[in-house]
Amino acid sequence: MQNVPPAQPTPAMQEPKTAAEPPARAAVPSDESATAIPSAKSSGDAAAHSISQPLPELPDDLREQAYQTVATARFAIHADGSVDVDLIKPTPNPRLNQLLLEALRKWRFFPAMQAGHPVESRQDIRVHFNVN
């Protein structure tokens, strides 16, 4: 295991890392975020934050339906940074939801830290599709 400096607390709204060439989309923590640790005030405590956010490549026939669509995903973030994810507010299109879930399962996080140790946490993230 690498020595990684403790993560800084993430802001309530964060800008996503942009993926190469897919349509512009943003993913931000939801106001309904429910993280398993207290606010990151004491030394060694920090909320989980994403380090990889691959988003789905949309086929042409889904682009119009996905335009300005929003879904909310609930991530269970494990201490190793891997995730389990469910759509708690899916889009109206089941095919779009399937593509989105496949991509969200590939997301990786720097885990939440408590007393300097990685811990499991949960985060709700709104995913916006702003198709060009």
Image: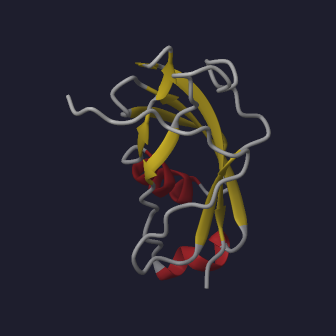
Q: Is residue 52 left or right of residue 63?
A: left
Compared to residue 53, the image places residue 73 above or below, namely above
Q: Is residue 103 left or right of residue 64?
A: left
Instruction: Give the mark count.
Output: 0
Which quadrant of the structure image shows residue 81?
Answer: top left
**Quarter of the picture holding the C terminus:** bottom right
| Residue projecting furthest to the bottom | 132
Q: Nearer the viewer, residue 79 or 38?
A: 38
User: What x and y, as percent, mark residue 29?
Assistant: 67, 45
Q: Is residue 54 left or right of residue 26?
A: left
| Residue projecting furthest to the top | 115
Q: Residue 23: in sight, yes or no?
A: yes
User: What x and y, as percent, mark residue 56?
Assistant: 45, 64
User: What x and y, as percent, mark residue 51?
Assistant: 42, 50
| Residue projecting furthest to the front | 43
Instruction: Determine the residue positioned at 51% across, 22% down.
Output: 44
Compared to residue 82, the image places residue 98 above or below, namely below
| Residue projecting furthest to the left | 1
Instruction: Determine the residue positioned at 42% across, 33% down.
Output: 83
User: What x and y, as percent, mark residue 126?
Assistant: 68, 49
Instruction: Determine the residue positioned at 39% across, 23% down.
Output: 79
Q: Residue 90: in sight, yes or no?
A: no
Instruction: Determine the residue positioned at 42% across, 59% down.
Output: 54
Instruction: Specify the color scheme.
Output: secondary structure
**Quarter of the picture holding the N terminus:** top left
Q: Nearer the viewer, residue 31 or 66?
A: 31
Compared to residue 46, the image places residue 107 above or below, namely below
